[in-house]
Image (cartoon, grey):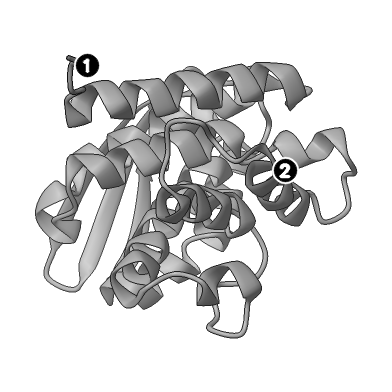
Amino acid sequence: MKRLRSPRQMHREIIDEARRLMNRLDPEPAHAVQVCRLALQLFDELAPLHQLNQEARMLLEAGALLHDIGWSVSEKGHNKHSARLIEAHGFQNASTRQMLQIAALARYHRKAHPKSSHRIFQQLDPEAQSQVRCLAALLRIADGLDRSHLNLVERLHAEVRDNRCVLSFESRQRCPSELWAAERKSGLFEEVFGLRVEFQPI
């Protein structure tokens, strides 16, 4: 009799598949790995705020690893190319819903916020759409915090205070470009969670 896999095993298989696709298509996988690391730190630090489960964490991890594979097609609109490549790949170990969520995260790591008129987003049920909005908000900030692609930010800490979310970060050196980009990309977070984001270098 075939042994049933646990959700944890299935999640690991999806991440392993995402890493293989990243290594095959992303011209600069070290950036994707750094963005993924920061995005997961944000997810864990803000767990009481978003209250998402481990499946959502897996989706964020996969989406972060694959957010820039569209550069293998073109710099222009690379976020949309990333989403198309994820859809074309399919994912052997993910459901259609999970695959579409991962593609949507890559689609929304930059530029436009999720909209019901967007093809990928409208294919998702309301719960999945809500998850994508929350996770994309985290991914956009994490991507901003590695704008230079130099892996400068080492550690993040998040704290909700009244109507603010204070994101403190440690870095190997001053990183004004990262700070500027993260602030610029925090709009979706503020929209989703109703909190003003403040960044504090440590």
Q: Are marks 2 and 1 in contact (CB under 8 Å)?
A: no
Mark 1 neighbour class, 10 Å CA radius: few under 14, some 14 to 19, many 20 or more: few
Q: Position of residue 28 (x, y in %)?
A: 73, 22
State the residue lying farthest toward the front: 1
Q: Look at 70% across and 44% down and name the residue there.
A: 88
Q: Give 129 or 168, whichever is nearer the viewer.
A: 129
Say if 133 sits above or below 82 in the image.
Answer: below
- The residue tagged 1 is 2
Task: Report whether residue 201 is seen.
Answer: no
Looking at the image, residue 151 sits to the left or right of residue 101; the answer is right
**Foreground tag (2 vs 1):** 1
Q: Is residue 148 above or below residue 95?
A: above
| Alpha carbons under labels 2 and 1: distance apart | 32 Å
Residue 57: x and y, percent? 29, 40
| Residue that appears at 42% across and 56% down | 97
Specify the amino acid type for callout 2.
Answer: Leu
For this rendering, which residue is in front, 19 or 5? 5
Callout 1, which amino acid? Lys
The residue wearing badge 2 is 85
